[in-house]
Every structure is written in C-alpha cells, then in structure tokens.
Amino acid sequence: MFPNPANPLVTAPAETTILAMLLAESPLSRVELARRTGLSSTAVTKAARPLIDGGYLHELPPERTAPGAGRPVNPLAVTPDREFFVGVWIGPDGLHGTVCDLRARARAGAQRELGDRDPASVCALLAELVDELLDTEPEFRERTRHLGVVVGGEVDRDTGRVNLPVLPGWQDVPLVEAVAAATGLNVTVENDVKALTVAEHWFGEGIGTEYFAVVTVGRQVSSGLVVNGELVTGAYGAAGELGHVRVDPAGPPCRCGSNGCVEAIAATDAILAAVRRSAGDPALDFAGAVRLARAGDPDAQDAFARAGRAVGTGIATLVTLFGPERVVVTGEVPDALDLLDAHLREAYAAHCFKAAAKCALTLRPLPWEERARSGAVIGIQALFP
Ligand SMILES: [Zn+2]
C-alpha cells in the first residue's frame, strides 16, 4: 500500500537519513550505513525494516567476506521502480516533462509547445502532458503520486503561489492548487534554480557535500546555495542572486536599477546587445553573435570574454564568502559555453581568496531534460518531512 500522499513516507530521523543516503548511493551494507550516519547497527536495521516492508528497499544476496570476518552481510539497495515521479519545467516557450524513478533516472520524456499563455490554458496543457507521460508505461500510472513543477520565477512554497515574469498574467497564481486539481497528483512547486541545486546536491556532483553551489548562466544569471547540507532560501526569499553582484562599477545599467552587475554583462541579452553594437547590426540574433565570435571577430569575442570574466568574478565572490566544496556552472546556451569557459576560469582563479580556490568548478550545458528532472527530484523530496 502507498502511504497517504499528504504524509511523508519517512518521518523518523533514522529512516530519513538512511533513505536519503541510499537514494544517492546504493547499495550500501548496514555496517557502511552505520559508519557513515553515526547510527548503531541496530538502529540501521530497525530503521530499514519499514522501508524494506514497504518495498522501497531490498536486500541483496550476501557479500562474500574474508574467512573469520564474521557472518556475511546483505547490502541494502533502493528499489528504483517502487515509485515514479513526474517533473515538469514550465519554460518560456513550452512545457517539458519527464518521469523519473526513485533514483532520479529519467524513464520517459515529452514536451508541449505553449499556445495560450494564461494560467488556465497552461495548466490544462500541463495536465495533458502529465497524462501522456503516465500513459507511457502502465506501471507509471499505478505507482506515481508526486509531481514537481519548476518555474523560472518567484515561488512561495507555503502557499504554492507563483509569479512568473516570462509569462503574461502570471502574478500570484495558485499553481499548486490548479495543477493538483487538473492532475489528481500531489504537487510541489519550486524555483528552477533552487530545484536544480537540490537535484545536483542529492543525485549529482553535490552528493555528500555540506557546502555546494549551482550557478546558471543564460537569460539570467542565478545561483543556488547549499550550506550545512541545506538549501539556502534567504530570510526574504532572495538569496544567491549572483546575477546582481556588482563586478564593474563602470559597467552597463542593470534591470535591477544598479549598474555593472554580473547579469548586465553576462546575460544572453547583454552579450547580444554588446555584439549588436560593435557589429552595427541591430537585427543580429544570439546564434549570429556566436557565429561572429567563432569566425574570429575580435569585438564579438571580447563580448563573450567580458561575460565569462563577469561570471568568474561573481563566482569568486560567492566562493570566498561561502567556501563551497564545488560549484557547478550550467548554461542555457550550450553552444556558447566554451566561449566563456577560459575567461570565466581565469577571472575566478584571479579573484578567489586563498584556500577557497581549491573549490572545483565544472561547466556544462543545461538541457531541458535536466530541468524537468529537477522537478521530479522535488517530487522525490516530498517523501521526506
Ligand atoms: Zn542588477
């Protein structure tokens, strides 16, 4: 039987710890689980029991142990197909959805182009997309209770209401209520950068880190922070606004009212505006700007170089203040990331304070599948208190 969707799957702290650890890394022996969590072997066994009974964990055949090392141990593993999770990213032009298993592996994907962009039309389209995804396999429909929706905007996790600057008429929209009514699923909504940070912390490069950050570069420049193993939300809901860290006092004006912010130099619109000016071509698009830079146009190359340096300097500030173990930089502009890469790393290395510079930096593209998957991870998070 499934637990009541209104209640988390695990409530006891030991169960929560063990399930979270096995989701990230599976299988692990009880001895290893005890060692890593600081729980006693008895506590591990006791905590695992209801999860084994509920079908979320299973025991693997005993591992061979050295002679005289005591009785053989049965490692514990997550049963990925026990439950499935739908994730949907509401993008500026379309809906992108996925079904993931318990270990956040994508098992199906589908997309819809946006027609009417008012909340009611988008929610109806979202319900259609979820239906299509759940129809991919009979077991998806049988074993899916949670849907995570991620959006590029402000999210109030308590009320489930959102403000989306990219879609007209999306002010204070009760998204959780509307999507829950349209799909019948247990719905959670989260800001896309925060969701990516959680996904990367639980299932990606941030596994096992206490201090970790994700930086997104594209239409906007944002960051998500994990401090003491927890996502930072900020006292006023605004935290990690890396895009509005000022890196050049003489830099161009920013939409926030200040000037010289990372975003005013490194957002795709800012790069494009700079290349349009230098090329004297107000109709140039972003792909055209990339082509110019690749063809060796020095002004176009300089615009990308300045963007890379602005992001690198911003990340150096973040790393110097918070000391993360690693930072993942992920870009909405997959075909232009390499134009930023070397400049970003150079500025980062130049401005990072001493030991903080040990922090590893990864740059990689951000395809829609990953955004949708981060929604499914927010669904998986709903299993926890
Ligand atoms: Zn700004």
Image: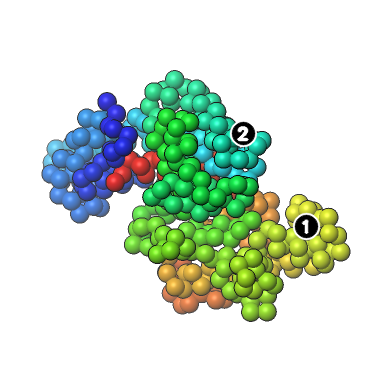
Disc 1: CA contacts within 10 A as few (<14), some (14-19) or many (>=20):
many
Quarter of the N terminus within the rendering: top left
Which quarter of the figure has residue 209?
bottom left
Q: How many labels, in total?
A: 2
The residue positioned 79% from the left and 67% from the top of the image is 299
- Looking at the rendered structure, the kind of residue marked 2 is Arg
| Residue 166, image x, y percentages | 62, 50
Residue closer to the observer: 217 or 127: 127
Q: Secondary structure at mark 1?
A: helix
Identify the disc placed on residue 112.
Answer: 2
Residue closer to the observer: 180 or 292: 180
Going by the image, does 175 lie left or right of 79?
right
Kindly report which numbered mark, 1 or 2, lies closer to the viewer in this rendering: 2
Identify the disc placed on residue 342.
Answer: none
Q: Residue furthest top?
A: 138
The residue positioned 57% from the left and 40% from the top of the image is 119
Residue to which mark 1 is pinned: 289
Find the distance from the CA under tag 1 to the CA under tag 2.
Answer: 28 Å
The residue positioned 82% from the left and 55% from the top of the image is 284
| Residue 130, image x, y percentages | 51, 30
Q: Residue furthest bottom?
A: 249
Going by the image, does 296 lie left or right of 84?
right
Going by the image, does 232 lie left or right of 120?
left
- Looking at the rendered structure, the kind of residue marked 1 is Ala
Can I make out residue 80 in this image? yes
Can I make out residue 346 in this image? no
Q: Earlier in the sequence, mark 1 or mark 2?
A: 2
Residue closer to the observer: 174 or 233: 174
The residue positioned 56% from the left and 71% from the top of the image is 245
